[in-house]
């Protein structure tokens, strides 16, 4: 049974606010504010400087605001009117019973919700417990589940220091550092029992019992439970199990996944939740399946093989990784060390237990695979794009000896993005005018987006230009700070104020700097790249951002090469920028302000990708390899001419990496020189590029309806959570066969 302390953090914060402003505290403790631009604006208006200083964290802001300032706000009728309107909007949102889910899938109930497990959740930059795409997708998943009223709880880990921060030294080499997350000053609540003590449960990690406490983040109507081992009554080593995201060695990784999977099931039990479905978002949480089995064996007294089907019926799995090397595997020695006391509770021998995670049965040296475990014990499995589903079926055919590649039971549900989070307020306002004030509720409907054609070219371009100016300003600010921290010459620090030009064609490239993503592909031919970027008549500029994993030396080297290239060629110094320490705040600025989003991974190594989808909601155009979601999003006209963006290279891949790099770089240069740059600079006397804007509108119309998390969640409900549900969707990007 769930208990909380008699006084919640929201109530404590409310107590320091005047009566008229107490609703600010309620809303600050619900991440609904982070996808409600008007609410963000209301918090920011309290103290814009402090809002920036506290990392856009409303709790920290309200804890520090002066009484004088609060008095000024109360005396401002405009502010108070806005607060009342937003508080009423929040109350209606939280209290409504007539949700999409209630109408189409009433069998999913709050008493038995969907439990969504993930190693990271990216809700907002103020809660930095994410590294990139997987976490941000998980955050968007919860937000759309909330918007659609799907009963769901999230389960993850609360990392004391999260993912690393990045800074570049004078040579352009990435240096990593960590900072503590101030949990007590974030929109989080430590769950407590009736005596006011933290709710605690135990997990056996190797030879020790580790105590785990649970925090709750409210995400609209969805609760996110985050587990934390940083307690004084734990061994110092165990306190750091939830210290870093994706840090440490294999022993740390398996220990974290024990806490996430086994601990996650026990956390839900501790707070009184019995899920109808366990959804594993990637293999990190697959030990969850073992714990569900163990509890079922204990409850029923039946054997593992007798309860296996009933467990499988309640479990589903999403894979995001298109290469075998990206899937977590653990040696038999590690499994022996962590699970020697566990398989007996399942009624299994060591060999039977290890076989659950073995790709090849009978090999004593075969490691234990988390994805293999998930595929064996889940009734449904899916990749995250149509191509990724195909790649996954080929990759895992080895587990299905009786099936050919086409009938392997791994389908696909193409990823999307949360429209309310990633659409700039300026574009959202435009959509409200032409689609309707409730445009986010119609986001799945293609007919709504057809109205984009009614927007005057001048209006769309004006808003886009403002967003680009904001991006340039943000980039200059961040680069100036970086140069100051590196102790560069004063002339270089001042030069940051002249970096980039809002009137110039602007390319964005931001993602994890893994070698397969080819962050320096555009610079492969130095002379050709210089000619493109230094052209005085039709100039081009690019903004890079992203981190390389601390252990990825080649990824760090790619970043360094970009910095060296810029430093060694003064003619392009103001045309190339690298924004350090990529986070959700910088991501929003980039996807909202660029003209072109560049994505050039080695095909087919991008499972889906979602950054380009965010660009579509803001009127930007994609120039991408035909990989992941872009295989489904890219369209041509009747003559085969690009209509809503551009495709780099061919709809194929080769094992010859050097050949693929050569083909794709040549294609990219050709696209820029013959299509992208001429189209952008084909402007009328008022500087309006009508041909370019036609393509912007085509991108918005064709991609926004399909590649959003409302559609994605609806697909999960109809295909996975409650298969057979007639959701009445105008479109679907899902095909998920059920395990037999």
Image (tube, helix red, strand yellow):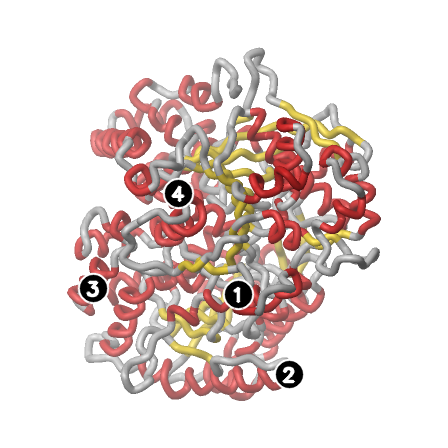
* Element carrying mark 2: loop
Is residue 342 toward the left or the right of residue 404 in the image? right
Q: CA distance from mark 3 to mark 1?
A: 37 Å
Q: CA distance from mark 2 to mark 3?
A: 42 Å
* Element carrying mark 3: helix
Q: Nearer the viewer, mark 4 or mark 1?
A: 1
**Dot 2 and dot 3 residues touching (CB under 8 Å):** no
255 vs 501: above or below: above
In this rendered view, identify the residue nearer to me: 416 or 1: 1
* Element carrying mark 1: helix
Label 3, residues with CA under 10 Å away: few <14, some 14-19, many ≥20: some
Q: Earlier in the sequence, mark 2 or mark 3?
A: 3
Residue 128 visible, this orientation: no
Residue at 62% in and 56% down? 167
For mark 3, what is the residue?
Answer: 450
Q: Position of residue 211 (x, y in %)?
A: 70, 27
Q: CA distance from mark 4 to mark 1?
A: 30 Å
Is residue 669 toward the left or the right of residue 312 in the image? left
For mark 2, what is the residue?
Answer: 656
Residue 166 visible, this orientation: yes
* Element carrying mark 4: helix
Q: Position of residue 589 (x, y in %)?
A: 41, 57
For mark 1, what is the residue?
Answer: 407
In this rendered view, identify the residue nearer to me: 637 or 589: 637
């Amino acid at each position: 049974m769930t208990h909380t302390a008699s006084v919640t953090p929201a109530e404590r914060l409310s107590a320091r606010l005047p009566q008229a402003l107490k609703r600010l505290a309620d809303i600050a403790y619900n991440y609904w504010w982070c996808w409600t631009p008007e609410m963000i604006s209301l918090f920011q208006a309290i103290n814009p400087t402090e809002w920036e200083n506290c990392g856009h964290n409303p709790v920290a802001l309200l804890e520090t605001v002066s009484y004088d300032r609060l008095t000024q706000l109360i005396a401002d009728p405009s502010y108070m009117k806005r607060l009342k309107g937003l508080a009423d909007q929040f109350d209606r949102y939280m209290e409504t019973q007539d949700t999409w889910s209630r109408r189409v899938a009433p069998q999913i109930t709050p008493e038995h919700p969907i439990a969504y497990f993930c190693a990271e959740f990216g809700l907002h930059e103020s809660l930095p417990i994410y590294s990139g795409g997987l976490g941000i997708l998980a955050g968007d998943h919860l937000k759309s589940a909330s918007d659609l009223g799907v009963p769901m709880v999230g389960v993850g880990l609360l990392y004391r220091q999260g993912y690393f921060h990045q800074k570049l030294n004078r040579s352009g080499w990435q240096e990593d550092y960590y900072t503590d997350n101030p949990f007590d000053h974030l929109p989080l609540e430590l769950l407590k029992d009736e005596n006011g003590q933290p709710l605690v449960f135990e997990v056996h990690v190797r030879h020790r019992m580790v105590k785990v406490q649970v925090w709750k983040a409210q995400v609209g109507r969805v609760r996110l439970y985050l587990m934390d081992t940083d307690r004084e009554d734990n061994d110092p080593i165990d306190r750091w199990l939830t210290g870093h995201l994706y840090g440490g060695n294999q022993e740390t990784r398996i220990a974290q996944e024990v806490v996430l999977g086994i601990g996650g099931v026990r956390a839900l039990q501790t707070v009184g939740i019995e899920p109808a479905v366990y959804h594993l978002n990637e293999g990190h949480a697959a030990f969850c399946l073992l714990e569900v089995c163990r509890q079922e064996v204990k409850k029923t007294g039946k054997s593992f093989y007798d309860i296996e089907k009933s467990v499988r019926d309640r479990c589903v799995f999403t894979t995001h990784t298109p290469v075998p090397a990206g899937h977590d595997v653990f040696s038999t020695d590690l499994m022996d060390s962590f699970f020697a006391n566990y398989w007996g509770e399942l009624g299994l021998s060591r060999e039977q237990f290890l076989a659950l995670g073995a790709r090849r049965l009978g090999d004593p040296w075969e490691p234990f695979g988390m994805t293999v475990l998930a595929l064996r014990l889940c009734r449904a499995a899916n990749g995250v794009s149509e191509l990724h589903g195909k790649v996954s079926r080929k990759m895992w055919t080895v587990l299905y000896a009786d099936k050919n590649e086409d009938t392997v039971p791994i389908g696909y549900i193409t990823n999307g993005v949360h429209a309310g989070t990633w659409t700039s307020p300026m574009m959202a306002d435009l959509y409200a005018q032409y689609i309707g004030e409730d445009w986010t509720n119609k986001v799945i409907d293609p007919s709504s987006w057809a109205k984009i054609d009614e927007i005057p070219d001048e209006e769309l371009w004006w808003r886009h230009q403002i967003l680009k100016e904001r991006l340039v300003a943000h980039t200059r600010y961040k680069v100036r700070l970086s140069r100051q921290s590196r102790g560069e010459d004063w002339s270089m620090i001042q030069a940051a104020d002249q970096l980039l030009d809002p009137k110039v064609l602007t390319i964005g490239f931001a993602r994890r700097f893994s070698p397969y993503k080819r962050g320096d592909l555009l610079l492969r031919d130095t002379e050709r790249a210089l000619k493109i970027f230094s052209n005085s008549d039709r100039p081009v500029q690019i903004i890079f951002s992203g981190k390389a994993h601390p252990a990825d030396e080649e990824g760090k080297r790619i970043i360094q090469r970009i910095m060296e290239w810029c430093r060694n060629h003064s003619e392009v110094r103001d045309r190339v920028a690298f924004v350090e320490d990529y986070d959700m705040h910088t991501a929003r600025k980039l996807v909202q302000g660029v003209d072109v989003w560049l994505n050039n991974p080695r095909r087919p190594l991008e499972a889906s990708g979602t950054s380009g989808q965010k660009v579509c909601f803001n009127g930007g155009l994609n120039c991408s390899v035909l990989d992941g979601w872009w295989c489904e999003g890219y369209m041509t006209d009747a003559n085969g001419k690009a209509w809503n963006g551009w495709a780099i290279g061919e709809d194929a891949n080769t094992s010859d990496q050097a050949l693929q790099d050569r083909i794709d770089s040549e294609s990219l240069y050709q696209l820029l020189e013959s299509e992208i740059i001429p189209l952008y600079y084909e402007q009328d006397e008022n500087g309006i590029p009508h041909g370019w804007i036609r393509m912007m509108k085509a991108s918005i119309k064709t991609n926004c309806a399909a590649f959003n998390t409302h559609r994605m969640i609806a697909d999960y409900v109809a295909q996975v959570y409650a298969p057979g549900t007639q959701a009445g969707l105008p479109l679907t990007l899902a095909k998920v066969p059920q395990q037999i």
